[in-house]
């Protein structure tokens, strides 16, 4: 099961009326510092505050509307929010199952979008078990957060909007965004480097790529909370695409991610930790630009109190 460049072009046509073609803006400060053009793809300005709306809208629009009794998902937040928004826009009921660890601001945002939010357990596994129950008992259709061809194709539409830079820096968790962007970008520009970025601890895709197969990792608190969670031991789509298409994966410490949030914050871009990893890697010298470089700012849904603490100098998620 895979995703082709044609699938991504089809997705772009399908979701056109439901998503924003977000701006691609120069990061003048980083460009001057590094001597190469650095650009920010502003998905924190996407409707619902993250790129996840692209995959969710494409997946829901790909379903047989006649058979649709409703959709369900488990999510660390941004995907649930995207499913809720897309479902409401398309007139489909949505159930969103979340672990009790998901930040309160994200839970509230999903409820405000009219979804039936179910808070269960304290892990992503518990939330996913609740989705399975809803699928079996209530006849809902699951919209997975990353490991689904229509979701990957939707996320890949970001790659159609960034031209053909030398390097693309993509936040990496389950790999839907990285896989989709890599398929789109490598088709347009085979020499473009696509680099996945994630936190040092608890990064399931990074550990799985090292092991050569999907593995589970222990989750730890991180500024990049949207990058937490496993990739699924039965992963069908994203593991193979990330293995085959990513040029490398770079790991960031919490202080490095905090630096990235602060740099972007000073430029007026309020982003969550997951969205700051590309900028963080450039600031830390862990990625050396060798031509035009695009950092994907994947989302802006950070708890305002946490953002304020980081701007004031905090280097970790601890209060
Ligand atoms: C989901 C998410 C990611 C990671 O995307 P994957 O497709 O799971 O790799 C990165 N940043 C933000 C803001 C997200 O919500």
Image (spheres, helix red, strand yellow):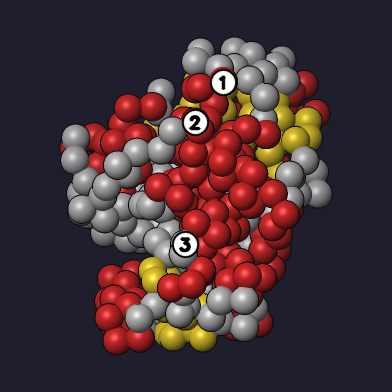
- Residues at marks 1 and 2 touching, judged by CB atoms closer than 8 Å: yes
Q: Is residue 116 left or right of residue 32?
A: left
* Camera-side mark, 1 or 3: 3
The numbered mark at residue 63 is 3
Hey, which quadrant is residue 229 in on the image? Answer: bottom left
Q: Earlier in the sequence, mark 1 or mark 3?
A: 3
Nearer the observer, 103 or 67 = 67
Q: Quadrant location of the C terminus?
A: bottom right
Check disc 2 and report its element: helix, strand or loop: helix
**Distance (Cα) linking label 1 and label 2:** 9 Å
The numbered mark at residue 188 is 1
Q: In the rendered image of this protein, does residue 50 appear above or below residue 195?
A: below
Check disc 1 and report its element: helix, strand or loop: helix
**Distance (Cα) linking label 1 and label 3:** 28 Å
What residue is pinned by disc 2?
Answer: 5
Instruction: Residue 37 in the image: state x and y as whole percent.
Output: 72, 20
The numbered mark at residue 118 is none
Q: Is residue 223 left or right of residue 173?
A: right
């Amino acid at each position: 099961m895979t995703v082709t460049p044609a699938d991504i072009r089809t997705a772009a046509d399908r979701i056109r009326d439901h998503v924003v073609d977000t701006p691609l803006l120069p990061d003048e400060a980083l460009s001057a510092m590094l001597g190469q053009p650095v650009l920010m793809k502003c998905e924190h300005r996407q409707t619902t505050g993250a790129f996840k709306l692209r995959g969710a809208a494409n997946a829901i629009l790909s379903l047989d509307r006649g058979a649709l009794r409703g959709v369900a998902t488990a999510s660390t937040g941004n995907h649930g929010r995207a499913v809720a928004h897309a479902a409401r826009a398309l007139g489909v009921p949505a159930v969103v199952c979340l672990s009790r660890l998901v930040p309160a601001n994200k839970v509230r945002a999903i409820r405000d979008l009219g979804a039936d939010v179910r808070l269960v357990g304290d892990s992503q596994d518990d939330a996913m078990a609740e989705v399975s129950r809803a699928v079996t008992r209530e006849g809902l259709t699951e919209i997975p957060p990353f490991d689904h061809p229509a979701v990957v194709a939707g996320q890949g539409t970001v790659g159609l909007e960034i031209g053909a830079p030398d390097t693309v820096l993509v936040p990496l968790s389950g790999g839907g965004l990285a896989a989709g962007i890599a398929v789109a970008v490598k088709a347009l520009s085979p020499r473009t480097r696509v680099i996945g970025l994630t936190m040092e601890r608890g990064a399931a895709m990074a550990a799985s790529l090292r092991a050569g197969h999907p593995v589970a990792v222990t989750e730890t608190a991180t500024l990049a909370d949207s990058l937490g969670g496993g990739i699924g031991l039965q992963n069908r789509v994203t593991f193979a695409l990330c293995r085959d298409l990513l040029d490398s994966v770079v790991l960031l410490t919490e202080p490095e991610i905090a630096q990235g949030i602060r740099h972007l914050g000073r430029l007026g871009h309020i982003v969550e930790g997951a969205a700051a990893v590309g900028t963080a890697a450039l600031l830390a010298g862990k990625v050396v630009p060798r031509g035009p470089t695009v950092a994907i700012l994947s989302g802006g849904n950070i708890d305002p109190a946490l953002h304020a603490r980081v701007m004031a100098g905090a280097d970790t998620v601890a209060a």
